[in-house]
Amino acid sequence: MDVVTTLLSEININNKYVLRMDNFLPSKHIDKFNLLILENPNIYSENCNIFHNDSRKYIGIQFADLISGACFQYYENNNNEFMDIIKEKHRLIHYNKYSLGKTVKKKR
C-alpha cells in the first residue's frame, strides 16, 4: 500500500476520479485500505470514489497487473525481458520505500 499512497500523493487531481483497485485484498483488509486513503488529505477529496473490482472486467487493472508482473520478474527473479520491452516505450518511476525517494528514468 506504500506505493499506492505515495503515487497518489504525488498527483494533483482536481477533477472527479475513480480509484479502481484489483480485488486482491481479503475483505477484512479492504476497509483498512479504504480508510488509509480516506484519512489522507494529500490523496482523498470528495472527488474520489474507491472500488475493488475483479481485474478480468477492467482492462486498466489488467494492464496494471501486466506491469506489476514485469516488475516482479525484474526484481525477484532478475529477469529483465519484460521490463526491457516496457522501458523502450515508457517513462518509468522507480519507487524505493527504504530511501523514501524515487528516481525518474526517461527515454531519450
Image (cartoon, rainbow, N blue to C red):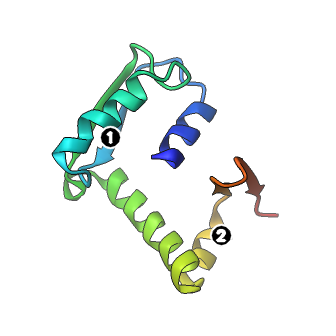
Numbered circle sitting on residue 72? none
Q: Secondary structure at mark 1?
A: strand
Image mark for residue 20: 1
Q: Position of residue 16 (x, y in %)?
A: 41, 20
Q: Nearer the viewer, residue 20 or 24?
A: 24
Residue drawn at the location 44% of the way across and 16% of the way down: 45
Percent across and percent down for residue 80 are 60, 83
Q: Say what amino acid the circle numbered 1 marks.
A: Arg
Q: Left or right of 106: which side holds 15?
A: left
For label 2, count other residues whose C-alpha is less than 10 Å away and answer few (under 14), some (14-19) or many (20+).
Answer: some
Query: Residue 17, can we see it?
Result: no
At mark 2, the secondary structure is helix
Counting from the top left corner in percent of width and height, residue 107 is at 76, 63
Question: What's under tag 2, amino acid-wise?
Answer: Lys
Query: What is the total number of numbered labels drawn onto the structure image?
Result: 2
Tag 1–tag 2 contact (CB < 8 Å): no
The reply, left or right, for residue 53 in relation to residue 7 is left
- Residue sitting nearer the eye, 102 or 107: 102
Whether residue 96 is visible to the viewer of this picture, yes or no, is yes
> What residue is pinned by disc 2?
87
Residue 108 occupies which quadrant of the picture?
Answer: bottom right
Q: Residue at x 31, y 55 (%)?
A: 59
- Residue 97 vs residue 5, the one in the foreground: 97
Residue 28 locus on image (x, y percent): 19, 43
Relative horizontal placement of residue 33, taking residue 6 as reference (left or right): left
Tell me the CA gap for discs 1 and 2. Answer: 25 Å
Instruction: Estimate how packed mark 1 is, as few (under 14), some (14 to 19) or many (20 or more) residues with alpha carbons within 10 Å.
Output: some
| Residue furthest right in the image | 108
Up/down of 9 relative to 62, above or below:
above
Sequence-first tag of 1 and 2: 1
